[in-house]
Image: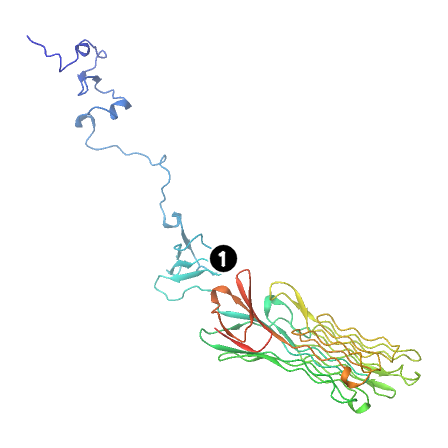
Amino acid sequence: MTIQTDAVDIAMLSATGTAGSTTFLRGDNSWATAGSTSASDLTSGTLPDARFPSTLPAISGANLTGLTSSFSGLTDTTVSTSDPAINTNPSATGHIWVNKTSGEAYIATDVTTGANVWTNIGPGTGDVVPPKVIDFLVIAGGAGGGGNVGGAGGAGGYRNSYNSETSGGGASSETEFTFTTGTVYTVTVGGGGTGATAYDDKGNNGSDSSISGSGITTITSIGGGGGGAYPTSVSTGLNGGSGGGGGDRSETGTAPGGSGTSGQGYAGGTSTHDANGTSDNHQVGGGGGGASQVGSAGVSGNGTYGTGGQGGNGASSSITGSAVTRAGGGGGAGGGNNGTTGDGGTGGGGQGNGLNNGTDLAGAGTTNTGSGGGGTYGPYPSSGIGGSGVVILRMTTANYSGTTSGSPSVTTSGLDTILTFNGSGSYTG
């Protein structure tokens, strides 16, 4: 008999199997024992089909990982009983949201923290998008001070909708307005009132500021009220957004300040004339009203030199991203050359004047704060003019169109864009 040794390794022929078992020669010239296949047998050689049963036994999935049995368990999906909101912040666009109660489904198409866009891909049509609203601060022009022993000018009306901040006169925050894409909203910024134009004349009111456009109720702030002046017939302060201070009556008595407009500002301070004084020390003007405070009364000297009324304080807003106080009332005239003049209210109110020389001017209200000008003791050219107003709009940057006129300053704060109009212009939604 001839043995072909190149087909089978001679050493393999001498190998013995396990007692009671059957061994067989594998294709790689190694011996295997039936019924005892090792793991290495799965990586080399060939196993006959007979080694596998025709039906595999049931196996447990307990040791399997990375699998999910529900849609909600998938990455970038949410299943909820409610719809998403603009402040529902997904990690990326393409996130799917399913409302299992209504059957609505959404996909995130714009991811901006707090201003996300969820497009409806279900049976409905209601996309979830940031509302197109604009917050505003509208301040009218402040008034001029009275011309002779004059009361101060009142601040312009102050209306505010931003972040629950108060409006003028102690009023609550107003409601922002909803704008329409393509609509032009006209912004009018009121100028400050001039000082008195005659020796014994009152200061002039400031001009109104406003926002108007199709689909909204025009938002108007009233110009500040001018300060009163000597003599009796013109001593009462004028009404306005905030009222002007009363001027000297040139006789025993009290001259009232003008009234403020409800929801916009406070009244001006009174002026009390005391005939017991000597020379001109009994003559004083009341302070102009401010957005957050009544102007204080001018106090006659009663034998000593009097003190002009302090302007009412303005109000603070962070609509531009930082807190700024605006719309302070002007200070009233002091009693004679040695009297004490009234200070302007916080937020830009002009200081009163106590000199009777026609050269030292009472302070003007600060530009673009809507603050009142100071009253003067001396001749009319020296009374303070009112500060011009301002209109500020704030909206989410995602909704900002970029179309304006009138060259407002454009800044950003967080997710919002802010337009500050120091002069009249417009914004197109």
The answer to which of 70 and 178 lies nearer the viewer is: 178
Q: Is residue 82 above or below residue 221?
A: above
> Where residue 1 sits in the image (x, y, percent)?
6, 8
Q: Amino acid at mark 1?
A: Thr
> Total label count?
1
Q: Is residue 228 visible?
A: no
Q: Residue furthest bottom?
A: 233
State how the image is colored: rainbow
**As drawn, is 56 to the left or to the right of 272?**
left
To which quarter of the image does residue 63 belong? top left
Q: Residue furthest left?
A: 1
**As drawn, is 5 to the left or to the right of 34?**
left
Residue neighbourhood size for the residue with mark 1, other residues' Cα within 10 Å, grouped as few (<14), some (14–19), many (≥20): some
Q: Residue furthest front?
A: 359
Residue at 15 percent across and 14 percent down: it is 8
- Residue at the spot of label 1: 113
Q: Is residue 68 above or below residue 152?
A: above
Q: Is residue 297 above or below residue 200?
A: above
> Where residue 356 sits in the image (x, y, percent)?
84, 82
